[in-house]
Image (spheres, helix red, strand yellow):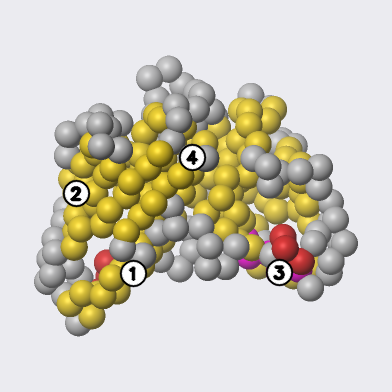
Amino acid sequence: EPEVTQTPSHQVTQMGQEVILRCVPISNHLYFYWYRQILGQKVEFLVSFYNNEISEKSEIFDDQFSVERPDGSNFTLKIRSTKLEDSAMYFCASSEFGRPGSYNEQFFGPGTRLTVL
Amino acid sequence: EDKVVQSPLSLVVHEGDTVTLNCSYEVTNFRSLLWYKQEKKAPTFLFMLTSSGIEKKSGRLSSILDKKELFSILNITATQTGDSAVYLCAVEWGSQGNLIFGKGTKLSVKP
């Protein structure tokens, strides 16, 4: 069964460093998303991406964040200068949303746990 | 402010019990409501509900949406220890299909 994959599973970084989190969405999906979940809190929307551009972003997704689809398979989230409060689990999701008649069943990857020291 | 509220926040039952998890929402431009099961890591998709009053079933799990009263319930019958997880309710809104999540209900099923 096709699934969303993410690498690395755990990333430890120093405050101020740049990190890139990688995701491979399900191959025939058109919409891609990043969410984050701070420990003990709810899952929060960061950004949606369609047709090689950002569709929507939340208030959390400030200038320190960027997303890219550098090739036909990968979807990346970059945090330019990490802060302590960026420590969280980051989930990538994808869906067929965008195809005529499709519903937005979003399938989530296993997540990357980011720890900022 | 859009919000999704789940209750109870946690629940402890014994194997064989039936449980009902609740999700109420106040979201503009509602499109659908989704239920996910979160064990160790990634939320796993369970149901998507778009129409009121139509029950969706998958094995021992079922769910229904009431768009007039703005809530949904997730039922699990004959619970098993493997049902222990956090159950997340999320509402899809707007034209881009973004999800707003509730805090989840942590279900613990004791043998």
Residues under numbered marks 3 and 1 in contact, where contact means CB atoms less than 8 Å apart: no
* Residue identifier under label 3: A115
* Spatial separation of the CA atoms under disc 4 and disc 2: 25 Å
* Residue B32 percent location from the top left of the image: 36, 33
The answer to whether residue A73 is visible is no
Say which residue appears at 64% left-offset and 24% top-offset: A51
Q: Residue at 51% across / 57% down in the picture? A: A42
Q: Look at the numbered disc 1 and give the secondary structure of its residue.
A: strand
Q: Which three-letter amino acid code belongs to the residue tagged 4?
A: Asp
Is residue B69 visible from the viewing direction of this image? yes
Residue B89 magenta:
no
Residue density around tag 2, few if under 14, some if 14–19, many if 20 or more, within 10 Å: some
Question: Distance from label 3 to label 2 (Cα)?
Answer: 37 Å
Please name which of the two marks, 1 or 4, marks the residue nearer to the observer.
Answer: 4
Q: Are marks 3 and 2 on the same chain?
A: no
Quick check: B71 left or right of B16? right
Q: Main secondary structure of the magenta part?
A: strand
Q: Earlier in the sequence, mark 4 or mark 2?
A: 4
Q: Calculate the distance from the C-alpha at mark 2 to the C-alpha at mark 1.
A: 19 Å
Which label was assigned to residue B10? 1
Three-letter amino acid code of the residue under disc 3: Thr
Same subunit, labels 4 and 3: the answer reads no
Residue under label 4? B2
- Measure the alpha-carbon separation of dots 4 and 3: 29 Å
How much space separates mark 1 and mark 4, taking CA atoms?
23 Å
> What are the residue bounds of the magenta stretch?
A112-116
Identified by mark 1, the residue type is: Ser
Mark 3 secondary-structure assignment: strand
**Residue B12 or A48: which is nearer the viewer?**
B12
| Dot 2 or dot 1, earlier in sequence | 1
Identity of the amino acid at label 2? Answer: Ser
**Image marks 1 and 4: residues in contact by CB distance under 8 Å:** no
